[in-house]
Image (cartoon, rainbow, N blue to C red):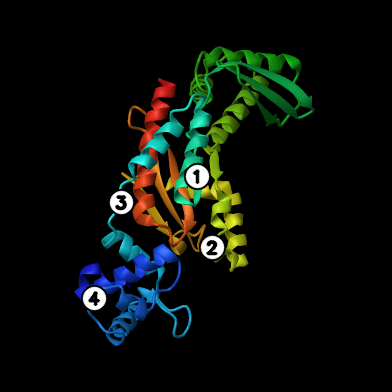
Amino acid sequence: MTPPINELTTRARDIFRLVVEGYLESGSPVGSRTLAGAGGLNLSPASIRSVLADLERLGLLAAPHTSAGRMPTESGLRLFVDGMMQVAEPTREERAAIESRLAGPGPIEAALEATSAILSDLSAGAGVVMVPQREARLRQISLVPIADLRVLAVLVGADGSVDNRIIELTMSLPASALEEAANFITAHLGGRTLSEAAGAMQAEIASGRSALDAASRDLVERGIAMWTEDAARRRVLIVRGQANLLDETALSDLERVRSLLDDLENKQSVADLLDLARDAGSARIFIGSENRLFALSGSSVIASPYRDQEGRVVGVVGVIGPTRLNYARVVPMVDFTARSLGQSLSKLIG
């Protein structure tokens, strides 16, 4: 069990902080001679080695090779991030870069693409954005038979968008039943989203007020069940900057690289991980094996929710990188980007 930071002596805290900061800056283990030459400790290399050994026994540091320097373990990084890290606010140049990229003209999708790209550029990691679950308001639906037990539902949005869904039937239906079901659904759309319309249709069918015959009612109910489930699962993830993860350290461990890229391809799992940050007041940090998704690749995730103009969480932005991310710099950067994206989306939607 990791000890609380206040249980370490002042000497141990100073040495531990220098090791972690040195490792995060260089990516290499930090040795006692380096620490002795850093100044401010007034300790001999032998005394420093003794403290390093104590920190290693506590599970905060590890030596990758005999006679090598020390590097923080995942527990050590967690202790540093939670108890010692002093965050550095984004510089004026970084804030200007983020705001200018998000202020560009174009649809909402362009702002989301820009967000993932700017986070990747500034963090030297992979930038990720979980797109808000937005449903178009619908205007019309058509049901077209494409096989004996399959129907194509063509949904036309109020904005002119067209979406196609396949519905599996339990029995073959005549053209009259398809037309009746389509007319019933269209009558209930009226500028509603699909999930809103589904709720109204379900209530009318359940109350017995609907004049639908049994065949048409079965088709509508199947459509409602499929659309409601589909809308709940339709999350889109934008990932940019995967190439940033292939640094010299990563290329020395090709198995870790392969695992990391495989993880990024599983966008549903990445979205599930980012979902854990939706209720956070600010950025959440997942270090290495603290999340099962990136446990094998030893990667960290910094994620922060972004909100609409009513303050409701609509999505999550984040950075994925090695555990030696510059947390003090990236954490406030992700938070600032989340706030800027929320403001930008409010202007686009409003």
Q: The C terminus appears in which quarter of the rendering?
A: top left
The residue that disc 4 covers is 41
For marks 3 and 2, the one nearer the N-term is 3
Q: Residues within 10 Å of mark 2 (few under 14, many from 20)?
A: many
Which numbered disc, 4 or 2, marks the residue closer to the eye? Answer: 4
Q: Is residue 250 left or right of residue 101?
A: right
The residue that disc 1 covers is 128
Front residue of 184/190: it is: 190
For marks 4 and 1, the one nearer the N-term is 4
Q: Residues within 10 Å of mark 3 (few under 14, many from 20)?
A: few
> Eyeballing the image, is 42 above or below 80?
below
x, y (%) of residue 95?
36, 39
x, y (%) of residue 150?
74, 29
Which numbered disc, 3 or 1, marks the residue closer to the eye? Answer: 3
Q: Amino acid at mark 3?
A: Ala
Q: Is residue 314 visible?
A: no
Front residue of 42/322: it is: 42
* Disc ID at residue 31: none
Residue occupying the point 72% across, 26% down: 151
In the figure, residue 225 lies in which quadrant? top right
The residue that disc 3 covers is 88
Which numbered disc, 3 or 4, marks the residue closer to the eye? Answer: 4
Front residue of 8/85: it is: 85
Tag 3 and tag 4, C-beta contact below 8 Å? no
> Eyeballing the image, is 27 above or below 155?
below
Residue occupying the point 47% across, 41% down: 118
Q: Residues within 10 Å of mark 4 (few under 14, many from 20)?
A: few
The residue that disc 2 covers is 297
x, y (%) of residue 38?
30, 73
Q: CA distance from mark 3 to mark 1?
A: 21 Å
